[in-house]
Image (spheres, grey):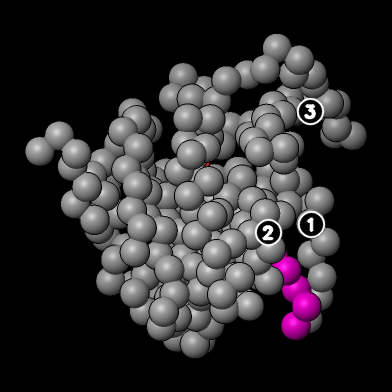
Amino acid sequence: MLTVTPKTPSPSPFLHEPLPKSQNPNPKPSNSHQIHCFNGSYHKPTYQTERGLQFETEDTFFRHESATGRDLGVLSAALYKQSKQQLRVLDVMCGCGIRSLRYLAEAKADFVMANDGNDAHRRVILGNLKSIERGSGDEKRWVVTHFDANRVLSECYLKREFFDLIDIDSFGSDSSFLRTVFNAVKRDGLLYLTSTDGYSSGGHRPNK
Ligand SMILES: C[S@@+](CC[C@H](N)C(=O)[O-])C[C@H]1O[C@@H](n2cnc3c(N)ncnc32)[C@H](O)[C@@H]1O
């Protein structure tokens, strides 16, 4: 099991509302421009690039500084795929969907479930994954869902839909998800646990 603990200030625990702008660490690129929608409203795309992939973050929680943490997850996934010839990923707290996009594009995941409890992120996540053909039926490469983490993990277990790699990138400690995540991961599968502003369950405390 691989655990990484970036030490960063986090917003409040899980909320169903988008983060207030004052808490959102996303840098707003100076070339942002507004797109007017048919209903008269507009949204401001905030394009980012990571390892050559372009994506939008808007009001989702996203930190460029976590790129190395995402690299390690993608590297583990790519090595797993190379050795097992299969890779089903559950990205439990996907934010804007950057990890899901990278698991699909870089690790060549066969299937990714991109979940985030906040359904206000849906448009951004769908937009970010649309460069990867979605497919259909048994060939489906990705889906986007909006369940609480413990619920999605429990439902996967009950439906016997197990995953090769489960990525949980939580605000604060991941300890409340450990019981359910072990039920949803395949035998010999990988758990990738990162926690913003909290100690990881791997007990990694380099200063102690
Ligand atoms: C640290 S951010 C994820 C960042 C993203 N993984 C990345 O690498 O950019 C945590 C995300 O988890 C979602 N979240 C928080 N608590 C959750 C819960 N209990 N169930 C599902 N999603 C949750 C939040 O909406 C937020 O988008």
Circles 2 and 1, Cβ within 8 Å, touching? The answer is yes
Disc 1 element: loop
Q: CA distance from mark 2 to mark 1?
A: 7 Å
Residue of label 3:
41
Q: Residue at 26% of width from left, 41% of height from top?
A: 198
Q: Which residues are magenta?
A: 138-143
In this orientation, does residue 18 appear? no
Give the residue type that dot 3 points to.
Ser
Residue 207 image position (x, y, % from top left) = 15, 34
Is the shortest distance between ligand 1 and the CB of mark 3 under 8 Å?
Answer: no
Is the shortest distance between ligand 1 and the CB of mark 1 under 8 Å?
Answer: no
Disc 2 element: helix
- The crowding category of the residue bearing disc 3, from other C-alpha atoms within 10 Å (few below 14, some 14 to 19, many at least 20), is few
Disc 3 element: loop
Give the residue type that dot 1 points to.
Ile
Residue 59 image position (x, y, % from top left) = 58, 32
Residue of label 1:
132
Name the front one of labels 2 and 3: 2
